[in-house]
Image (tube, rainbow, N blue to C red):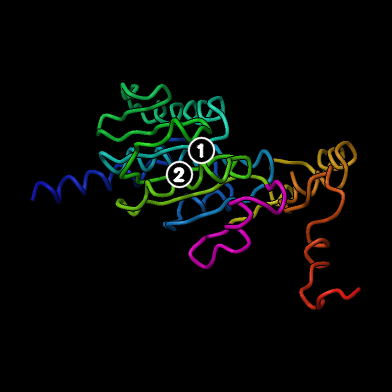
Amino acid sequence: MEERRARARTAKRAVPLREKLDFQLDAWQAQVLESRAKRGILNCTRQWGKSTVTAVKAVEQAWGHAESLTLVISPSARQSGEFLRKAGQFARKLEVKTKGDGDNEMSLQFPNGSRIVGLPGNEDTIRGFSAVSLLLVDEASRVPDELYMAVRPMLAVSGGALWLMSTPQGKRGFFWEAWERGGEEWQRVQVTAYDCPRISDQFLEEERRAMGERRFRREYLCEFTEAEDGVFDLDLVRGSITGSFGPLRV
């Protein structure tokens, strides 16, 4: 009986959470927050709010599920710290008093025992965590493959959710592989700058002129273009490789 009451109290807190946060959602952001997918990819334009909306998702997880652990992986300590700052702001809007967990420099511990922990992009410093309920990989296209492979086993026992969020950085790495070849288990969300109501067409035209077509398509149209310093396009190189030639005769 007491366990059922505890679950009911948790559900009651979770329902009005977004209203309390006073966070104005666009349609795509609402879709991400309402999703119950175990695997998700946000391939979204710069300044769409990838980190902000997943910070809300992290706070929802922590506040709605006692004793849960959310991990945030980023290319650098600064980026993980910025994510934790956003999550802390949302927690304060809920009038929730958080504190550090005593073990990790970048962490928020909630009164119900849940934690949100931010980690830098260093494989040597992230091992040892287990039973992760929610794993968020911020700026995923910039996170090394080795680090990503090191954190995935943390979901093995808990069956927790994994979300990757980034703008593309070429046809390489786990972010591109998951987007292109990850399979049906991944929920894919792509939002270009033209789909974002907060970015004006005038600004985008200025950016296109300033940064060039290829970079613009990557940063604002979410296309997996090749780096500017590549001599040949990757698809062209792959298309030129064939196994139809026989042995050379002299």
Badge nearest the viewer, 2 or 1: 2
60 left or right, relative to 39: left
Q: Which residue is mark 1?
A: 23
Q: Amino acid at mark 1?
A: Phe
Q: Earlier in the sequence, mark 2 or mark 1?
A: 1
Q: Where residue 182 sits in the image (x, y, percent)?
A: 55, 62
Q: Where residue 219 sits in the image (x, y, percent)?
A: 74, 44
Tally of marks:
2
Q: CA distance from mark 2 to mark 1?
A: 33 Å
Viewer-side residue, 237 vs 159: 237
Asked whether residue 248 is drawn in magenta, I would say no
Viewer-side residue, 57 vs 156: 156
Residue at horizontal 40%, vertical 45%?
A: 134
Residue at horizontal 34%, vertical 36%?
A: 128
Give the class, few, some or many, for how many residues have Cα within 10 Å of label 2's Cα (few <14, many ≥20).
few
206 left or right, relative to 33: right
Quadrant occupied by the C terminus: bottom right
Residue 241, by quadrant, is: bottom right
Residue at horizontal 51%, vertical 30%?
A: 120
32 left or right, relative to 16: right
Q: Which residues are magenta?
A: 168-188
Q: Which residue is mark 2?
A: 150
52 left or right, relative to 70: right
Residue that sits furthest to the left in the current view: 1
Q: Where residue 146 sits in the image (x, y, percent)?
A: 53, 44
Q: Amino acid at mark 2?
A: Ala
